[in-house]
Amino acid sequence: MKYIFVTGGVISGLGKGTTAAALGRLLVARGFRVTAIKIDPYLNIDAGTMNPFEHGEVFVMDDGGEVDLDLGTYERFLDVNLSKDHNITTGKIYLSVINKERDGVYLGKTVQIIPHITNEIKRRIAAAAESSGAEIALIELGGTVGDIESMPFLEAVRQMSMEMGGRNGHREFLFIHTTLIPEVGSVGEQKTKPTQHSVRELRAIGIDPDLIIARAERDIEPDIKKKISLFCNVPVEAVISAPNLPSIYGLPMWLEEQHVAEYVLRKLGLAGGVPELSQWKEFYLKLEHPRYFVDVAIVGKYTELADAYISHIEAFHHVGAATECKVNTRFIESEDLEKKGAEKLLSGSDAILVPGGFGSRGIEGKISAAGYARSSNKPFLGICLGFQCAVIEYARSVLGWDKANSTEFNPDSPHPVIDLLPEQREVSEKGGTMRLGAHKVVLEPESLAAKLYSSTTIYERHRHRFEINPELISDLTSRDLRFTGKSEDSRRMEVAELRSNDYFVGSQFHPEFKSRPGRPSPLHMGLITAALKQKYGTT
Ligand code: GLN
């Protein structure tokens, strides 16, 4: 196992994860098995309890892990399915060390950051990397070098790299430092000083970066590369320019031109051939040269932060490349919809997505978005909470149950069409207790969903506490609404379709999490295909 450790300097939010993932793609393209681990130095055990406003979307894995959204980027770029132990947090580390202390594992010793916390960090990194069966592990440390929270992690990997040493002049452990090169003044002079400082900080901890990835507005000028090389003690060829690009999917090709993967492999003593990037390039070219244009309104309550819906946005990129269509995503704050009305804000869009969510704020706006889509035959996709909202709206408007609701929002509704999952009734702890992860869904053979998936058995990822109330299913399906996807025991309703509309589909699961370049989420694909058909008459 070879390790590539990625740190960040100067500021957070530099796109370290995307850069590391793009490097990972270049290694995968050369036939290596690559895995990724994200370290988040916060005290939360996982991202599940965090507001998407703080850190963006909570990504859900096959095994039910609720993790940082960077893991989604790694899954999409490396085309792997990771597990929850690939997201290491300070919370997880401390919890296990404290539990071990209570169990008497430390045999009377004083339990300390060094060596007990650092040993636990090392153990977890090695365990996650090795259990994946990969040859190369990318490990990204969240935050910025110099943060108090990051210190134990940096110390642990410093020890790890020292202990692993190297063989025949080659390294087992590489350090990549991603920094910001700001531009100042009217001529936009690129400044290296912040990078020099952050590399100095890293070296004070005992880590010498092998490669510097310089993020900037524009390509890094040759003189600036030389300057970084000189001050940061790396060869010029190890200073990589990573400017803002129109699409992150272009980053692997951009890095390949600078021979990053070759440099990394040479240092690690691995032989890599010519990369096989043709499919990725084709995907990227299709994405960049669309023939059609579709505008999708995403109705949610975290619309101030696009990262809160990142897997949907990426799923639409994947669909866009497959349909030669630029899918423009437009965020609509659901509370605005309540004030201004659905038609006013949504009639300009070609399709509507109501994604997942929690809590009652903005809920009536989401319900009205579903109602507007249903009555105007605008292609509609409701995911999780969006699916539940569509069923509430249908019950109110079509069945005449005007107080229909979810017990999440009105526990006293006379028509609780959405109700708590029975196994959730005794649950009071919040962390990791929802119905989570990949579960089997059986689709009706004649359904639109089965057609879109080209299968009647699928596995999709879940994250919910509420479901369609089993007692009201026969009433809900007395008209044209159908539940065409169910859990294996037929108890849980997983997909709803309104066949009288061109495309009106809802799913309790989240297909956006498994969407990949070249394999777009079938339900997002269905939405855009329907919008294209209405707009351009394409089939
Ligand atoms: N709040 C709803 C539930 O718990 C929907 C969850 C979601 O959209 N992820 O069932």
Image (spheres, helix red, strand yellow):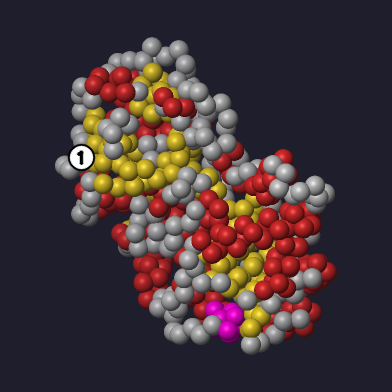
Nearer the observer, 500 or 490 = 490
Of all residues shown, which one is farthest toward the left?
Answer: 446
Image-based side of 465 in relation to 182, left or right: left
- The residue lying at 43 percent from left, 49 percent from top is 62
Image-based side of 491 in relation to 163, left or right: left
- Magenta residues, dominant SS class: helix
Nearer the observer, 71 or 93 = 93
**Residue 446 position in % (x across, y down):** 16, 42
Q: Is 136 above or below relative to 503?
A: below
Nearer the observer, 11 or 468 = 468
Of all residues shown, which one is farthest toward the front?
Answer: 107
**Residue 23 position in % (x across, y down):** 54, 71
Query: Which residue in the protein does label 1 denote?
Result: 444
Of all residues shown, which one is farthest toward the bottom?
Answer: 168
Which quadrant would residue 343 be assigned to in this image? top left
Dot 1 amino acid type: Glu
Please count the marks in the image. Answer: 1
Per the image, is 304 magenta?
no
Which quadrant would residue 391 be assigned to in this image? top left
The answer to whether residue 41 is visible is yes
In the structure shown, which secondary structural element does the residue marked by tag 1 occupy? loop
Which quadrant would residue 517 be assigned to in this image? bottom left
**Residue 357 position in % (x across, y down):** 49, 35
The answer to whether residue 42 is visible is no
- The residue lying at 45 percent from left, 12 percent from top is 412
- The residue lying at 28 percent from left, 34 percent from top is 489
Range of residues picked out in magenta: 261-269
**Residue 93 position in % (x across, y down):** 67, 50
- The residue lying at 72 percent from left, 81 percent from top is 234
